[in-house]
Amino acid sequence: MNLKHLFSRRTISYISRFNGSVTSPNPCIFKNLSTVTSPLFIYSPPNQNPAPSQDPKYGKPNSSFIRCIHSSQESKLGDLGSDPEIDVEESEEDGNMTEFLSRFVWIMRRKLSEVYLDCDKNTIEGMLLIIVGKVVSEMEKGGLEQMLDTAVATPSNDFSEDLWKTVWEVSSEVLDDMQKAMKKEKMKGFLQSEEVKKMYRFAGEVGIRGEMLRELRFKWAREKMEESEFYQSLECLREEEAQAEKEEYETTYNKSEVVSEEAVGNDFVMDEEKSKVISLPKRHGKIKYKIYGLDLSDPKWAEVADKIHETGEIFWPQEPQPVSGKCKLVTERILSLKEEDNPSPVLAEWVELLQPNRIDWITLLDRLKDKNSRLYFKVAELVLGEESFQTNIRDYSKLIESHAQENRLDDAERILKKMNENGILPDILTFTILVHMYSKAGNLEKAKEAFENLRSVGFQPDMRIYNSMIMAYVNSGEPKLGESLMREMEARDMKPTKEIYMALLRSFAQRGDFGGAQRIATTMQFAGFQPTLESCTLLVEAFGQFGDPDQARSNFDYIIKVGLRPDDRCVSSMIAAYRKNNLLDEALNLLLEMEKDGFEPGVSTYSVLVDWLGKLQLVDEAEHLFGKITEVGESPPLKVHVSLCDMYLRAGAEKKALQALGVVEAKKEQLGAQDFERIIKSLIEGGFAQDATRIRGLMEAQGFVVSEPLRVALMALESIKYKPDLSHNFGRKRPVIR
């Protein structure tokens, strides 16, 4: 091996000078190493070959790994030798050899420094160059494996017994470390393989978590690595056998036609020694073997194999039957059906012609789903009752999930009812689909029932199920129950998403629960989510709804302190907090301060001010701010029209009240229970009993329940004389709400 592959030209020349000084008969061979006095460099007499004792902790290095290092060197030298124009110094270094020598030098330097405490750095470097030169020369003779095999039995004439033993131990240690490093890198590749990741995701979905999941992932990766190594070894055996057969054929072809019997015998022996073909030994009699203590040669296992084969026929993918002739025409008729058509007669004819099996039905349903999804749902429901379809629970759950994705809740519940009637009980996957479906539809009771059924069968909810249930609680106005599920997630080391935190914070803020909002905001910060303008605004809104303007202003000032710029929604939330306690002066001072900083009020701020001034019966000022909203270029929110209607009814402006009431009635679907009650109370105070009763009917039609104080006020109003209907006052009919 050429040393230029391992070191630069300067280092090579330096090693050469030391090697020349060691082998030279000149008595001054150690003039540069005058300080060396340890017996490490004491020469052993040629006639003595003492075998040093082997330390049991240093085992023999892996021979396959050593061959890998040495063969890579030889292949590179062969490639360089085939082209004389390639400069050896500019060729790529052997990575394995470079790493071996680097590790070797690093360990040997430490060992020499521990023995030669009085030697300077240059002397230690000189010793290392001599040792490396000797190691490289031994590798050039027969490779690192041969050097290590003969190191113990045949000490070097240049090195003492202790030094040569140390070289052998360090080399073994380096090779072991390199082999472990290579296995570690190989293990990383298998950890990221698609098969291992797929099994890892599946294990996570079925509820495996923590250390057990990590151990399983390493176990699967290790099994894949061992399987890969096994097949690689088989491939190497095949290549060696092919090479041996090739050499045997070339040797036989080159033989002379006329060869003496003795010569032929000698050639045969030589060929046999040269080509050692590795093959499996011939067996005699019946094979008996055991796996985990079971004798699989027992006849009972033949029955097990037959059952496994029969089961495999069910799950093994089959090809659909060819469709031709009249059956093809009937298939086209099925695909061309419309949603309102009855597919049962055509399906019966198709079944009679084709005699389909499960794969034929699946093929037909897939084509229907791609062409007409509405018709697919109808046909799929009919197919569930076909005996040839071999319906199982997964077919029901897939159809339920398809209906749920299309928001067809009634159809999904009908399929679930059919499944129960046929004696098929929902499993974990079906309950999971039901949790997502009912949570999305806002049916909290059904979602809770499916969630508890999941827990009853021992399934640990995953992130998606927790998110669905938390959102179901939030949408139903029960954020505290959603928070309890969030705490349960944290106890299981599952980190909620930022969207879940914000949904809970928004729900607490809308209900004026400042304690819950403060807890969620604090938890967000501990989870690593920094405060944002929206989260701080929600805290301002929560304290404002609760009626604590001081805490609301404290959070508002914190927004400015951290460098955030309050927007229109944030300012309107702060003004709403002042409105709750009728602190008009503080609200106006806040607006003046914000306008100095360049803030321009928007629709949200103007809407809060219109409502506030309307309650104060400042009609002109409220109308002026209402005009500001229209100048912004956006349509006024429905809340503003409710405020104007309330203001005009209380002020006795019947014409304007009629106009505002007409706008509100036209958008009755968007009104909430509080909006209806506010309008009814205003009508009662104005004495308009008929209009109050009519608005009450609209309220109940929307599914809202009239509060007890309002019901009592309506009954009291009906018992006294009331004013005529507003529409009669103006001699025209009230707009009809369709």
Image (spheres, rainbow, N blue to C red):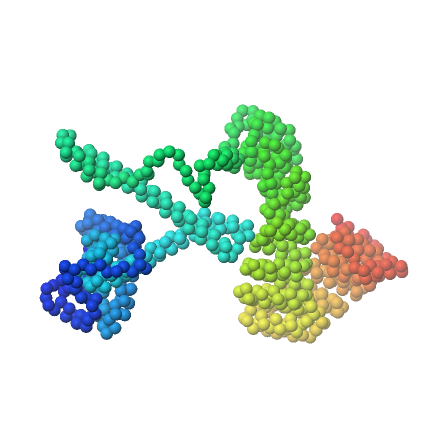
Q: Horizontally, is 157 left or right of 473 in the view?
A: left
Task: Tell me: 35 left or right of 100.
Answer: left
**The furthest residue to the left:** 26
- Up-down: is 471 above or below 263? below
Query: At 26% across and 60% down in the image, what residue appears?
Result: 53
- At a point 17% along the width and 34% down the height, the residue shown is 265
Residue 656 visible in the shown view: no
> At x 40% / y 53%, what residue is drawn?
187
x and y percentages locating residue 156 in the rendered image = 19, 60
Q: Is 505 situated above or below 222?
A: below
Say if residue 228 shows up in the picture: yes
Tell which of 460 and 406 is nearer to you: 460
Please, which residue is most extreme toward the top here?
A: 325
Judging depth in this view, the residue of 6 and 632 nearest the camera is 6
Task: Tell me where residue 381 sits by quadrant.
Answer: top right
Q: Relative to residue 454, is residue 255 depicted above or below? A: above
The picture places residue 400, in percent across and down from the top left corner, at 62, 43
Q: Position of residue 349 (x, y in %)?
A: 61, 27
The answer to whether 396 appears left or right of 113 in the picture is right
Residue at the image position 64 percent from the left and 59 percent from the top: 482
Instruction: State the quadrant of the N terminus.
Output: bottom left
How far across and down, in percent of the image, does residue 576 sit?
68, 68
Location of residue 59 (image quadrant): bottom left
